[in-house]
Image (tube, rainbow, N blue to C red):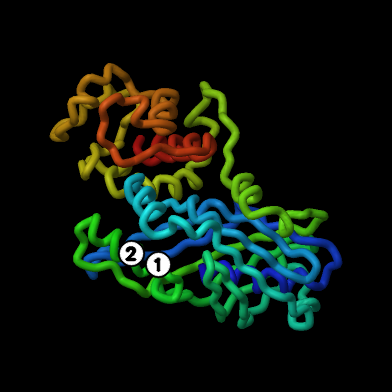
Amino acid sequence: MKLMKIACLAVLAPFAAFAGDWTLDGDASKLAFGSVKKDAVGESHHFTGLSGGVADGVATISVDLASLETWIDIRNERMAEMVFKGFGPATLTAPIDVAALEALAPGESKVMDIDATLALGPATAEVEASVYALRISETRALIATDEMIWVSTEELGVNAGVDKLMEVAELPSITRAVPVTFRFAFDAGASDAAAKPVAATAAAATEEPEAAPTQTAGLAGDPEKGAKVFRKCKACHVVDEEKNKVGPHLVGVFGRQAASVDGYKYSKAFKGLDVVWTPEEMAAFLKKPRDYVKGTKMSFGGLKKQSDIDDVIAYIAAAGS
């Protein structure tokens, strides 16, 4: 949450030199945080529902807490229910100090300290941070953390929720100092994004159009982008080595009969799957694994964006050939 405030402040400065409003590019922006459990296991999470903008000299950024992505479905559900329930979106507001950044030309950057106010439920908190502001062009700017931000779960009022999460997950510990980073991209132009109700902007940021099946899945994707999407799969699968982990390796998966990797113990659900893996079959599986393989106990809930599906298939095909 603190990070949001920071982002807002950072954003305002470079934009103040212009009379028009600025709108957050949710697809190009990211707010992430880390957690450590059992004193040794580190994990990375992020929010996908970011919205807002800069208008009338004030930056407003909304983070939809329900958009949390931890890469594990049950953990998403538990954190939403135990840690963030009842808070609604986190909102960050910050005034604009134009003097320091209005002289920046496209391509120039500046590191600065910022202050902002974060509202989380009934509580508000003051945040200070060092941010890196880059003027990409006359109509686009990027604000990112220059140094990692540390947030206290106690300060944010979520300690009780973390205690409950730790109890349910039967964990001996979850650290209460949380590292946070962000990357916020803003575009200039007439927009009322900063003034829109939080619920509406958050919904717009997270809603994905229904994509029609494609016969070119795996060909249309970008392997480099797919390598990043595959991070969601790395805990269970290897794509460039014939080594089984929690799940079977994916080397040479296309053209291979399902549940046929030597040495891997498949579930009943996968053993009954009469499928030869093709890019098209893989696309259907990645979209909704539990619908595709009835009875599977996989924790992975699927990929929401068709572009992510295409990209990761392209990566698997390239890296696992």
Residue closest to the eye, 269 or 216: 269
* Whole-percent x, y for residue 100 in the image: 74, 82
> Dot 1, how many residues are within 10 Å of its Cα: few (below 14), some (14-19), or many (20+)?
some
Residue closest to the eye, 255 or 187: 187
Tell me: 280 left or right of 159: right
Residue type at the position of mark 2 = Val
Point out which mark residue 158 bears. Answer: 1
Tell me: 28 left or right of 260: right
* Whole-percent x, y for residue 146 in the image: 54, 75
Tell me: 73 left or right of 189: left
Q: Residue at x 52, y 23 (%)?
A: 213
* Whole-percent x, y for residue 177 in the image: 37, 74
Residue closest to the eye, 254 or 176: 176
State the image quarter where residue 263 is shown: top left
Q: Residue at x 38, y 52 (%)?
A: 81
Q: Which residue is mark 2?
A: 162
Which element is circle 2 on?
helix
State the image quarter where residue 15 is shown: bottom right
* Whole-percent x, y for residue 247 in the image: 24, 39
Q: Residue furthest right?
A: 19
Q: Residue at x 59, y 71 (%)?
A: 5
Q: Which corner quadrant holds the C terminus?
A: top left
Distance between the Cα atoms at labels 2 and 1? 6 Å
- Tell me: residue 25, above or below residue 182: above
